[in-house]
Image: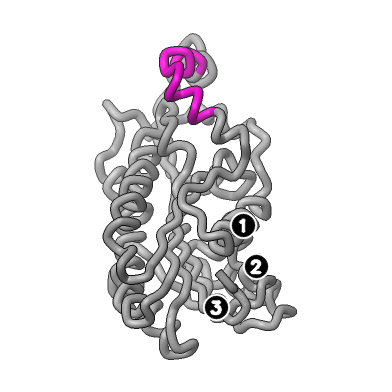
Amino acid sequence: MELKGARVIVTGASSGIGRAAALEFARAGSHVVQAARDRAGLESACREAAGFSGRCLVVPADVSDRAQVQALVERAVAELGGVDVLVNNAGLGLDASVADGSVDNVRYLFDVNFFGAIHCIQAVAPHMRRQRRGVIVNVSSVAGRIATPYSAAYAATKAALIALSDAMRLELAEDGIRVICVLPGYTATEFHRNKLRELATPSPSAALRGVPAQKVGRRIVQAVQREERTVYVTAGDRLAVLLKELAPGLVDWGLRRLWLGSRRPKPLGP
């Protein structure tokens, strides 16, 4: 797909993967609508993209609020004349026990990570259908294929996005709309500092050296240009998923050793 002049919406664009992807689309000459709850972060990201040829629009929006998403898409269409690419990237994490955790936190996680994507898809689909073209990118995670202890709700939202992408690809093909699912592994962003926490013990993933967000952003743009389907950012991510399929018991043993060690994590105090 030619991205020069393309009209792109990126959610969760104030930081991390979303910000990096928005900058890469701008670098390719696209007009980018950057959406997130953090206005200051969006404005900073937009200033960073100011040197490129396309327009940059800042639209603060909470994707869990259907009305705000509808207003976001209407603004994009009014300002740019349509939407060619939607990147569903907004999301957050949760460290919690399945057996003892807050159901309210799990519901909120699904409201943002999964239903937020649904809101965006349903808002842009009529416009893309009229154009007879469009690309929808759902940013899932390797966690959607390999769940780790105390990240069950997050992994479930990402697995749901993978299934959603597979079904959408079949449903929307006749409308000229392509669907891409991107599965990053551990990425060096603010994500792990900002996640919801119910446990006092930090996740071992906090000590991992992640892939730079810029690499993930570039990979998202490449996937749109190359018309890909399911995308892993690194060969290591793809290999890990393959190993999970071929030797699930071995992977489970390794994850228990790494995450649980000799004792269970303690819950946060009152």
**Color encoding of the figure:** one colour
Q: Quadrant of residue 148?
A: top left
Residue at coordinates 45% horizontally, 59% vertically from top-left?
Answer: 137
Give the magenta part as a residue range. Answer: 240-254
Residue at coordinates 29% horizontally, 69% vertically from top-left?
Answer: 122
Quote the CA–CA distance across marks 2 and 3: 14 Å
Q: State whether residue 36 appears in this view.
A: yes
Magenta segment's dominant SS is helix
Nearer mark to the viewer, of 2 and 3? 3
Q: With 102 as the anchor, is 211 left or right in this view? A: right
Residue at coordinates 65% horizontally, 65% vertically from top-left?
Answer: 24
Relative vertical location of residue 102 with respect to residue 20 in this rendering, above or below: above
Camera-nearest residue between 184 and 197? 184
Q: Which residue is mark 3?
A: 6
Give yes or no for contact between labels 1 and 3 (Cβ–Cβ under 8 Å): no
* Mark 1, secondary structure of its residue: helix
Give yes or no for contact between labels 2 and 3 (Cβ–Cβ under 8 Å): no
Quote the CA–CA distance across marks 1 and 2: 8 Å
Q: Which residue is mark 1?
A: 217
Q: Residues within 10 Å of mark 3 (few under 14, many from 20)?
A: many
Residue at coordinates 37% horizontally, 35% vertically from top-left?
Answer: 270
